[in-house]
Image: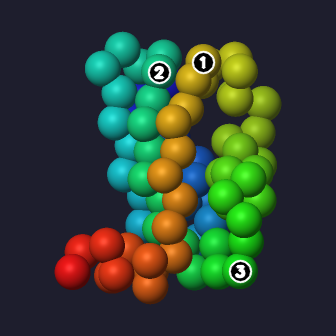
Amino acid sequence: MNPKQIEELIHVGLPGAEVRVRSEDNVHFEATVVSAAFAGLRPLQRHQLVYKALGERMGGEIHALALQTLTPDELATRSH
């Protein structure tokens, strides 16, 4: 897997999300996912939505994924 493939999978599972994935070794990944679907959800619930989008690849092709999950409002607040 490469970062672009992971971004595409997350986009399919979370339509309309803004997704950025980085990796230096294509085994360990860092992702920032911004989605309105995260509104009102706890961090664990947000991560579960992303894991669901990645399915069986988690723990297999994707050995480790560090996630930052934000709503658009949270992103806007952090940017100022």
- The kind of residue on which mark 1 rests is His
- The kind of residue on which mark 2 rests is His
For the residue pair 59 and 38, the one nearer the viewer reads as: 38
Residue 4: tell me if it is visible: no
Q: Which residue is pictured at 30% across the width and 20% down the height?
A: 24
Q: Which quadrant holds residue 80?
A: bottom left
First-in-chain label (1 vs 3): 3
Residue linked to disc 3: 40
The disc label shown at residue 5, or none: none
| Residues packed near mark 2 inside 10 Å, few (<14), some (14 to 19) or many (20 plus) | some
Residue linked to disc 1: 63
The disc label shown at residue 28, or none: 2
First-in-chain label (1 vs 2): 2
Instruction: Provide residue 38's location: percent of width, then percent of height.
Output: 64, 73
Alpha-carbon span between mark 1 and mark 2 = 6 Å
Picture layout, residue 15 above or below residue 55: below
Left/right placement of residue 21 relative to residue 5 reads left
First-in-chain label (2 vs 3): 2
Left/right placement of residue 56 relative to residue 7 reads right
Of badges 1 and 3, nearer the viewer stands 3
Picture layout, residue 11 above or below residue 55: below
Marks 1/2 in contact by CB < 8 Å: the verdict is yes
Q: Which residue is pictured at 78% across the width and 30% down the height?
A: 56
Left/right placement of residue 78 relative to residue 59 reads left
Instruction: Provide residue 37's location: percent of width, then percent of height.
Output: 65, 77
Instruction: Provide residue 66's location: percent of width, then percent of height.
Output: 51, 36
Q: Which residue is pictured at 70% across the width and 29% down the height?
A: 58
SS class of the residue under badge 3?
loop
Number of labels in the image equals 3
Marks 1/3 in contact by CB < 8 Å: the verdict is no
- The kind of residue on which mark 3 rests is Gly
For the residue pair 40 and 5, the one nearer the viewer reads as: 40
